[in-house]
Image: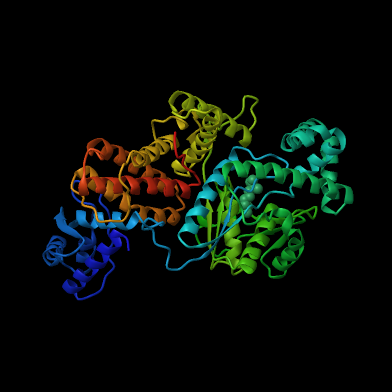
């Protein structure tokens, strides 16, 4: 049990004695540490329900608070109860954490099968900066959910069947450079795509030719299918290299094309069940009128002051199927084949109406027992405050962004690193560059836009990955200077404020990790790790370790050890590995 859970249990039993009824009081971290570690407004909530004076109820609680509880209790204001954890309890927590690979984090009592749909770039258009947020957020959420004991299935639902293939196929047949394709497949495929896309903008005949190539592909034309297969293989290899560099992996790569066969029967089923109907030659799903408030109906939109239909199209008038059709088929598959209990889509916020519609359709199909979430995120901005672009005005390619980050971190390494060999320095620069991109992404609230400022991201000072690396290395370095043998897990005693504060924060790891998954917000963990690092440096300055002896020395070594382990584990849950030296 976490400390607040323990407090809730004690508080509940005290309240039952006083009120004669059971209740579920809530204990939260205190807003102001001067008054305590945790607090509860239970007395105020329950006084109202029991027609009592809140302060009188709180006073009763304090009076009956057991003297052997893990915390002392005090009344504050109109009836808040503040709790201060006894230092011995923190000392016990540290003693437990230091030899526990989970650092006190419990597994969930009811594990679920969660499908995480993330990254999902569109093939033959290389992965661009827009996919970075999905890739990094999704990877971190999958690591955390797994660590908590859930059965997580990661699926890279790549866009491998869209209109871009018409263009790529047309360009492949006309301007392919085989040598370039072998040398750098992603770059050549991108060139083909851009060539066709530019040409079809100015030339009606080319646009039509591209469209026909797509139709041929979708009808199973052998030559076009062969080109498509080759494109797909090359693209996947190129993507795989980026994922390797990012240390991201997937259990499945079931792209859009995997569902081709299911689409026609699905549309027939929806038509047959009156869930969809024809409209101007296309097949669409409309509002079923079950939502009373039009602002909450995903199939309505306000135009010129009136609510009009905003249907979800599942078959185009030319017979082709849509992104939405595939997503419905995919959801059915995940439910039926994988017994998914939750499906979380880590996708740009601009697709929110698509997901609202998808989830509404899921409900009509009886798939709504699943926990379906659109884990939306905002935009990455350049230092000019506008969406990040290359100098040529294109969306930056992810691989280039990673290279730039490594180049920037090279400077930090040259100026600050104590590593001697060129090999070690290059390795550290790569680690810092990639980690800085990941950490910056995860440190922002996912729904807010953020500025991509490489120099800030790789700096040793600030709320950065390198700052946490430095804190980790510092907390570990003390053990290299140690002459005696150190064995973790013996009793410690906390006396100094800086020791107690560090222990207080370290013991909260058990509360923070589960909280990340509640709202799918890794930035809760990044803020926490930064707070731990700051507390560690204050402690390290205030409390000498090697100049002391006995239990004081052992206590401080234990705190360094738990700090190092917490930073290392916390970063690992974000998908970031720590360097052993810097
Ligand atoms: N390929 C899509 C895009 O790049 C994202 C797919 C997200 N996943 C899904 N099941 N719709 O916009």
For the N terminus, the image quarter is bottom left
Q: Residue furthest right?
A: 222
- At a point 60% along the width and 64% down the height, the residue shown is 362
Placement of 33 over or under 540, stated as above or below: below
Give the image quarter of residue 529. Answer: top left
What is the x, y in percent for residue 371? 52, 63
What is the x, y in percent for residue 212? 85, 45
- At a point 83% along the width and 45% down the height, the residue shown is 227
For the C terminus, the image quarter is top left
Give the image quarter of residue 105. Answer: bottom left
Placement of 541 over or under 62, stated as above or below: above
- In this orientation, does residue 409 appear? yes
What is the x, y in percent for residue 393? 64, 27
- At a point 72% along the width and 43% down the height, the residue shown is 235
- At a point 44% along the width and 36% down the height, the residue shown is 581
Placement of 246 over or under 307, stated as above or below: above
């Amino acid at each position: 049990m976490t400390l607040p859970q323990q407090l809730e249990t004690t508080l509940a039993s005290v309240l039952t004695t006083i009120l004669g009824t059971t209740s579920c009081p809530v204990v939260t971290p205190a807003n102001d540490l001067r008054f305590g570690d945790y607090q509860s407004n239970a007395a105020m909530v329950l006084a109202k329900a029991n027609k009592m004076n809140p302060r009188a109820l709180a006073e009763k609680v304090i009076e009956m608070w057991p003297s052997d509880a893990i915390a002392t209790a005090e009344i504050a204001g109109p009836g808040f109860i503040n709790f201060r954890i006894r230092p011995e309890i923190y000392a016990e927590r540290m003693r437990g954490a230091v030899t526990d690979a989970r650092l006190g984090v419990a597994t969930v009592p009811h594990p679920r099968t969660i499908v995480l749909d993330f990254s999902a770039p569109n093939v033959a258009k290389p992965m661009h900066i827009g996919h970075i947020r999905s890739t990094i957020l999704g990877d971190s959420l999958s690591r955390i959910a797994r660590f908590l004991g859930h059965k997580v299935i990661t699926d890279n639902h790549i866009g491998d069947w869209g209109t871009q293939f018409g263009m790529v196929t047309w360009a492949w047949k006309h301007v392919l450079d085989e040598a370039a394709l072998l040398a750098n497949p992603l770059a050549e495929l991108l060139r083909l795509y851009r060539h066709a896309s530019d040409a079809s903008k100015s030339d009606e005949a080319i646009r039509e030719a591209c469209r026909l190539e797509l139709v041929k592909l979708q009808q199973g034309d052998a030559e076009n299918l062969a080109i498509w297969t080759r494109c797909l293989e090359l693209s996947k290899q190129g993507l795989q290299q980026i994922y390797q560099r990012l240390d991201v992996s997937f259990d499945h790569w079931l792209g859009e094309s995997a569902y081709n066969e299911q689409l026609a029967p699905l549309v027939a089923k929806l038509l047959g069940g009156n869930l969809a109907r024809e409209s101007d030659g296309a097949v669409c799903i409309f509002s079923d009128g079950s939502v009373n408030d039009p602002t909450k109906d995903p199939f309505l939109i306000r135009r010129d002051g009136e609510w009009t239909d905003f249907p979800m199209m599942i078959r185009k008038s030319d017979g082709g199927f849509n992104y939405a059709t595939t997503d419905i088929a995919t959801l059915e598959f995940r439910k039926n084949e994988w017994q998914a209990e939750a499906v979380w889509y880590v996708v740009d916020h601009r697709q929110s109406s698509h997901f609202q519609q998808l989830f509404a359709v899921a409900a009509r199909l009886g798939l709504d027992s699943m926990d379906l979430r659109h884990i939306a995120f905002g935009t990455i901005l350049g230092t000019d405050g506008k969406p990040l672009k290359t100098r040529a005005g294109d969306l930056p390619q992810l691989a280039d962004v990673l290279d730039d980050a490594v180049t920037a971190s090279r400077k930090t390494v040259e100026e600050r690193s104590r590593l001697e060999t060129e090999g070690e320095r290059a390795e550290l620069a790569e680690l810092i560059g990639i980690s800085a991109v990941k950490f910056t992404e995860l440190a922002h609230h996912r729904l807010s836009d953020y500025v991509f400022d490489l120099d800030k991201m790789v700096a040793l000072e600030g709320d950065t990955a390198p700052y946490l690396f430095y804190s980790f290395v510092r907390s570990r370095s003390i053990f290299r200077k140690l002459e005696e043998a150190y064995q973790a897990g013996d009793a410690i005693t906390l006396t100094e404020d800086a020791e107690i504060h560090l222990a207080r924060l370290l013991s909260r790891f058990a509360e923070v990790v589960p909280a990340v998954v509640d709202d799918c917000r890794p930035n809760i963990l990044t803020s926490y790790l930064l707070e731990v690092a700051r507390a560690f440096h204050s402690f390290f300055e205030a409390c000498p370790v090697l100049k002391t002896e006995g239990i004081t020395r052992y206590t401080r070594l234990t705190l360094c050890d738990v700090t190092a382990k917490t930073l290392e584990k916390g970063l690992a849950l974000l998908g970031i590995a720590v360097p052993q030296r810097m």
